[in-house]
Image: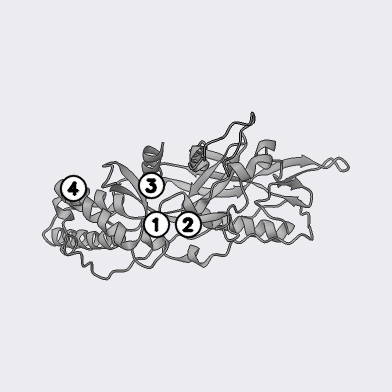
Amino acid sequence: MMPFGVYGEKMAQININLDALKPKKDWKRHKVQPGHNLYRMLPPFGDTSNGYPYKKWMITWGLLDPESGRMRPYASSLTTGKKCPIMEYVDALSLKAETIKNDLSAKGATDADIKEHLKELNKVISNLRPKTVFAYNAANKAGEVGILEIKATAHKKLKELMMQYINDYAQDPTSLNSDQDDSGVWFDISRQGEGFNTEYDVAKVQIKVKDPTTGRTAFVDDQSALPDNVVKNYEQAAYDLTSIYQVKSYEELKDILLANIKNIVELCPEAAIEGFGDDFTPPSTGNTGGGQARSNNTTGTTVKTTKPVNLKLDSLVDEEDDFADFSSSPLRPGASIDDDVFAMAESILR
């Protein structure tokens, strides 16, 4: 039956999907600046979060989109499977670079000569190697909800502190509330140094309070309230962390890689690898890596609650190889891998 309007006239059938006309949410990405950065990690969001407040991603930033010709991030197929064509190519390049290094060394080349010879090949390896980041919904003191991406070592430290908070308070550290028996906590993610000396650390924010009865001061965990707009609008402001990057299959990524290899080899002839062309038959190779988390001792007033804490922090996938950490490799180019990945992300996504 034809619907009628306010004044009784007949209205045409509307077939367009009205959701397509709604304005898209702007993407807010927090950046860890040099110095101290204060954030509240926010609760798991979306049907696919499975109770986790973060999502692990392995991202390559060094490939062009064959359709647009523009550089864009690609999620490694290791995110959902057990193999990745990009990682296979990077492994093959690394083996070739190591062979070249050994040959040059045997011929008496100096370390400086070897580094210069491998400069372009190392650049290709660094740009293509999938970098591991962990994405959180986070709020800053200004009340801005955005995506906060941190490297594996900072993530492991943050998980330790969250577990410590749960054990001390029996409360959820990502809670939107700031009640005595149900409160989240502020974290300080710090970045110090540059290049090879860049270091990231995480600590619970501590504030100084004075006991009115004794006059003594003590440092306690900062459970100060989130801005009202964060609490009231979290469902609209939060991001589905499982969809911030597009996931492609092994075969789809292989096609994208092959479309890029020709240009890569034109710029760096030594990046040509047998089996990585029309006859794509990569060898079987493996990877190692990972960082060590450090302990953190803080003191504070403990307030217990009987509410169960359902936050999940013990994902086994976190313990898998972290391909972003290979600082001991002699093939590493002359810049921090951590700085490289975030600098590339910022230039592409801004």
The reply to whether residue 311 is in sight is yes
Quadrant of res 106: bottom left
Image quarter where the N terminus lies is top right
**Mark sitting on residue 253:** none
Residue placed furthest toward the top: 7
From the viewer's perspective, is residue 316 above or below residue 47?
Answer: below
Element class at badge 3? helix
Q: Type of residue at label 4?
A: Asn
Task: Say whether disc 1 or disc 3 marks the residue closer to the N-terminus.
Answer: 1
**Mark sitting on residue 325:** 1
Residue nearer the viewer, 226 or 259: 259
From the viewer's perspective, is residue 284 above or below residue 252?
Answer: below
Alpha-carbon span between mark 2 and mark 1: 15 Å
Residue at 17% of width from left, 53% of height from top?
Answer: 110
Residue that mark 4 sits on: 263
**Mark sitting on residue 56:** 2
Q: Type of residue at label 2?
A: Lys
Quadrant of res 307: bottom right
Alpha-carbon span between mark 3 and mark 2: 15 Å
Task: Say whether disc 2 or disc 4 marks the residue closer to the N-terminus.
Answer: 2
Residue that mark 3 sits on: 341
> Is 303 displayed left or right of 349 in the figure?
right
> Is 98 displayed left or right of 76 in the figure?
left
Residue at 69% of width from left, 55% of height from top?
Answer: 172
Alpha-carbon span between mark 1 and mark 3: 12 Å
Residue nearer the viewer, 266 or 109: 266
Residue at 43% of width from left, 61% of height from top?
Answer: 290
